[in-house]
Amino acid sequence: MAKHPDYTRDQAVALLKEYTKEEFHLLHAFTVEGVMRFFAERLGYGEDADFWAEVGLLHDLDFEMYPDEHCVKVQELLKARGAGQDLIHAVVSHGYGLSGAEFAPEHEMEKLLFAADELTGLIWACAIIRPSKSVQDLELKSVKKKYRNLNFAAGCSREAIERGAGMLGWDTDRLIGETILAMRSCEDEVRAATGEALA
């Protein structure tokens, strides 16, 4: 049985923007939304793609306003808006072992969110220093080179990325390569949603 989203997309976007104002954080939310939709389709969960995308869009709902309660406060915020436990568990689990999150990633979707969350930021950081400022011509070898430089995008946790890859049973090359493809698939939509934030 398909897992349907708890909100319409317009409702989810409105909720996101109620608690998220900074352009960088909106860019991240819309990126992870698109990445999660891509992975749902690619891994055979197409009927759940809208739900996967919703989880990606809302995963950092509490981060900007409640950074010290990240993955804790969000439970209260989502419950107040009628969210189901599946959405709450998925959103909270991406911070397991990294914040105050009490739920560990269990479903493949939750493991992908955990793995790709930090990585999307590193990939954008690689893209925006290129002449094209785009992921469309960004290749795995370029990201791997930057990935190994711990001073580059230092805020992106390599440990979290590697833990996530391990949860999935993937090596980091596969995770990085697949996430590049995922970001290529949604770049136009992300730019449209964020007013060309990457320009």
Image: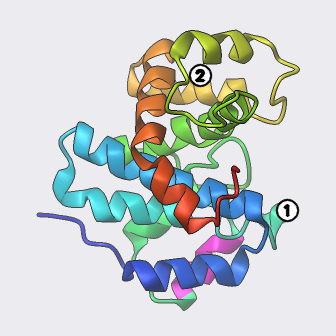
Rendered position, 17 above or below 61: below
Number of numbered callouts drawn: 2
Q: Report how far apart the C-alphas of labels 1 and 2 lie in the structure.
A: 24 Å
At label 1, which amino acid type do we have?
Answer: Asp
Per the image, label 2 sits on a secondary structure element best described as: helix
Tell me which corner region of the image, top left, top right, bottom left or bottom right, holds residue 161: top right
Rendered position, 17 above or below 197: below
In depth, the one of 49 and 1 nearer the eye is: 49
Residue annotated with mark 1: 68
Q: Is residue 72 left or right of residue 3?
A: right
Residue annotated with mark 2: 162
Q: Give the magenta-colored segment's residue range.
A: 73-79
Magenta segment, prevailing SS (helix, strand or loop):
helix
Q: Is residue 77 magenta?
A: yes
Q: Is residue 163 left or right of residue 126?
A: left
Could you tell which of marks 1 and 2 lies nearer the N-terminus? 1
Structural crowding at the residue carrying mark 1, measured as other residues with C-alpha within 10 Å and reported as few (<14), some (14–19) or many (≥20): few
At label 2, which amino acid type do we have?
Answer: Glu
